[in-house]
Amino acid sequence: MTLQFDVNTVTTAFDTLASAYQLPEVWWPADDPFEIMLGAILTQNTTWSRVQTALAALREHGPLTAAALLALDPATIATCLRPTGYYNQKTQRLRDFCQHDLEMGGTAGWMALTTPKLRQRLLSIRGIGHETADDILLYACDRPVFVVDAYTRRLATRLGWLPSAPLPYDTVRLAFEAVRPHDFNSLRRDHALIIHHGQQHCRPRPRCDGCPLLAECVNHPESAQSGAVIAPPWRSPND
């Protein structure tokens, strides 16, 4: 299925979020691209504060480089990663990624690949799925990709942009990329706005009071769109 969004609808929503939240410049706290990649892997199913604790613990045993991490006893890595949960599994994933990093010749090797080839290589590594791969592409490699996470799907469904049945990751990603500015700084801002909105208002149990997108939410009884029979901003060209 090919998905298309209405560019005006999506643009207006992001402009509304940007005006409401006035977020500072978007950045990923890390010393270098390799550390960003590690953080993207470790942040699965945990909070960023716990990832920072784990990275700080790893630094106590040496530099955050692929060679140095592979030289550590896996049990030592697991102890450092304990705050992130699933620490034995993440230890193996971290070591797998470090091995790939060495094979690539470090950051320069990743950067030399085209975006499709880089994504394909990342997805070939055990434990790296589409969202994690695109986190790495966007934040570590400065590639203009739209990251689709749980916040994105929840917001887009509640705004009527997506059907209730989940669609494949790349179907949603490509639909957003077709209507958003094609530069990594703008897409980082989009990602940050969605996450912030999801934490402030669009939670699994939503906090609708003060929501800047309330008038557009098809799920809220006080929304201007609630109960309305409207053409949704998503559609398949084949429909």
Image (cartoon, grey):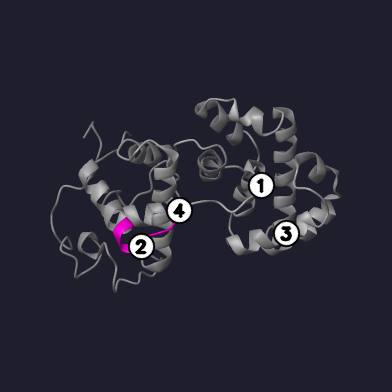
Location of mark 4 (residue): 25
Mark 4 belongs to which amino acid? Glu
**Residue at the spot of label 2:** 21
Discs 3, 2 touching: Cβ within 8 Å: no
Mark 3 element type: helix
Q: Dot 2, crowdedness within 10 Å: few (<14), some or many (≥20)?
A: few
Mark 1 or mark 3: name the one nearer the start of the chain: 1
For badge 2, the amino acid type reads: Tyr
Q: CA distance from mark 1 to mark 4?
A: 19 Å
**Element marked by disc 4:** loop
- The residues bearing labels 4 and 2 have C-alpha atoms spaced at a distance of 12 Å
Dot 4 or dot 3: first in sequence order is 4
Q: Which sits earlier in the primary sequence, circle 1 or circle 4?
A: 4
Q: Quick check: can you spot residue 170?
A: yes
Q: CA distance from mark 1 to mark 3?
A: 11 Å
Which residue is label 3 attached to?
56
From the viewer's perspective, tell me whether residue 124 is left or right of residue 131. Answer: right
Nearer mark to the viewer, of 1 and 4: 4
Q: Earlier in the sequence, mark 2 or mark 1?
A: 2
* Residue 35 position within the rendered picture, expressed as x and y whole percent measured from the top left: 66, 47
User: Could you give the CA–CA distance between mark 2 and mark 1, rounded to whole angstroms?
Assistant: 28 Å
Residue at 59% in and 25% down: 112
The residue carrying mark 1 is: 35
Labels 4 & 2 near each other (Cβ < 8 A): no
Question: Residue 154, image x and y in percent?
Answer: 37, 57
User: Label 1 amino acid?
Assistant: Glu
Label 3 crowding class (10 Å Cα cut-off): few <14, some 14-19, many 20+? some
